[in-house]
Image: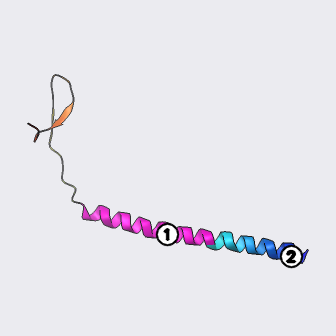
């Protein structure tokens, strides 16, 4: 009976600490994504509508 309780405690401990480790890795990945996203310049795209097709196209396109 005691070994079952010890086994249960070990499994609960592994799940708890494994979950904490996964949360830590996700937090680091989120910080990295936000850092990269902040470094990118968000330049607006100038679009014009094509009257024939109704599609929007970049004005820079020849």
Q: Residue at x 37, y 67 (%)?
A: 32
Left or right of 7 in this view: 39: left
* Residue that protrudes farthest toward the right in the picture: 1
Residue 58 picture location, percent across and down: 15, 39
Is label 2 in a helix, a strand or a loop? helix
Magenta-drawn segment: 18-40
> Is residue 23 shown above or below 51?
below
Q: Residue at x 80, y 73 (%)?
A: 7
Quadrant of the rendered image containing residue 4: bottom right
Left or right of 37 in this view: 11: right
Residue on which disc 1 sits = 25
Residue 20 picture location, percent across and down: 58, 72
**Which of the two discs, 2 and 1, labels the residue nearer the N terminus?**
2
Identify the disc placed on residue 48.
Answer: none
* Residue that protrudes farthest toward the top in the picture: 52
Which one is in front, 11 or 34? Answer: 11
Quadrant of the rendered image containing residue 8: bottom right
The alpha-carbon separation of the residues under discs 2 and 1 comes to 33 Å
The secondary structure making up most of the magenta span is: helix
Residue on which disc 2 sits = 3
Is label 1 in a helix, a strand or a loop? helix
Q: Residue at x 18, y 49 (%)?
A: 44
Q: Is residue 8 magenta?
A: no
Q: Quadrant of the C terminus?
A: top left
Quadrant of the rendered image containing residue 16: bottom right
Q: Residue at x 39, y 68 (%)?
A: 31
Q: Is residue 35 magenta?
A: yes
């Amino acid at each position: 009976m005691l070994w079952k309780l010890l086994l249960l405690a070990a499994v609960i401990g592994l799940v708890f600490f494994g979950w904490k480790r996964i949360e830590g890795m996700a937090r680091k990945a989120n910080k990295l994504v936000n850092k990269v996203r902040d470094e990118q310049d968000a330049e607006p795209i100038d679009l014009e509508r094509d009257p024939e097709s109704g599609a929007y196209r970049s004005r820079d396109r020849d």
